[in-house]
Image: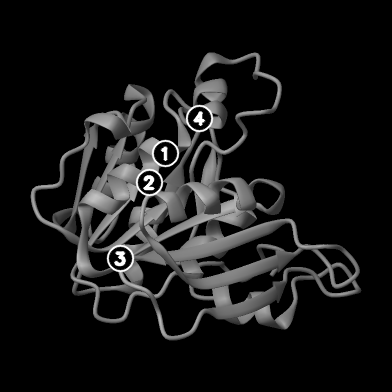
Amino acid sequence: MGFQCRQFYIKDDQCAMKVSTDSLLFGSYVPVVGVKRALDMGTGSGLLALMLAQRAPQAYIDGFDADAAAIAQAQENVLASPWSERIQLEQRCVSAWQAKQPYDLIVCNPPYFANHLASAQDARALARQGQVAPSAWLKCAARSLCDTGTFYWVLPTHQAEQWQALAEAEGVYLGNELRVQTTVKKTPKLVVQGWQLSAPQNIVREALVIHAEDGRYSEAYRRLTGEFYLAGQNF
């Protein structure tokens, strides 16, 4: 079980959270210009780390996850990719992670379903609900960023306000926001936010609709994620 991208393959049968439209969108959207060191917090199958490695050929990427099975599978995915020499993964809880050097970019698809019912599978429940408070992800990002670095996360819109308040309390500043709609007639379901250590002159606010009226992927979504999808993947 897995997902074939243009330049790499992701196995995810040992991971709680599978490859999804949301994660492919997130990994495609995050800016990588000038990034030399990146961190994928809660890497899971290693998808985001591999997407960053493909998009930023000059970057070295670290990743960690608390789940041993996920890290083992992520390592397998990385070793089978063209970029294994630029990606280092480690089994570690977010509260215990210590960066050896500061990062230009940090990405996180966090366990943001804390108020939902627990999954029947322990691993999936762990990935969806997390072992630690949301503030732990923020503290880890804030202490691991370089002065000019950026931290990006993706959240459901109904939790974005809560997490944004935590971020502001941690002393980081919103610099970029993308609101994502499934269709043009629906309210945004996801928000991607970029945070930094200094206040920006302006906050860049954008919007994206995933599906056109005929149910196919929108042209905007195709342009954003096209370097990862194979022809024939309903794309």
Mark 4 in CB contact with mark 3 (< 8 angstroms): no
Mark 3 in CB contact with mark 2 (< 8 angstroms): no
Q: Is residue 186 above or below residue 16?
A: below
Residue 141, percent from left and from top: 31, 50
- Image quadrant in which the N terminus is located: top right
**Dot placed on the residue nearer the N-terminal end, 3 or 1:** 1
Mark 2 in CB contact with mark 1 (< 8 angstroms): yes
Residue receiving disc 2 = 138
In this view, the residue in front, 183 or 46, is 183
Would you say 16 lies left or right of 143 here? right
**Dot placed on the residue nearer the N-terminal end, 1 or 4:** 4
Q: Mark 3 is on which residue type?
A: Leu
Would you say 12 lies left or right of 55 here? right
**Residue at 56 percent of width and 67 percent of height:** 230
In this view, the residue in front, 92 or 218, is 92
Residue 209, percent from left and from top: 74, 72
SS class, disc 2: helix
SS class, disc 3: loop
Inter-mark Cα distance, 1 to 4: 16 Å
Labelled disc at residue 135 = 1
Residue receiving disc 3 = 197
**Residue at 34 percent of width and 39 percent of height:** 74
Q: Residues within 10 Å of mark 4 (few under 14, many from 20)?
A: many
Residue receiving disc 4 = 127
Q: Mark 1 is on which residue type?
A: Ser
Outermost residue to the left: 100
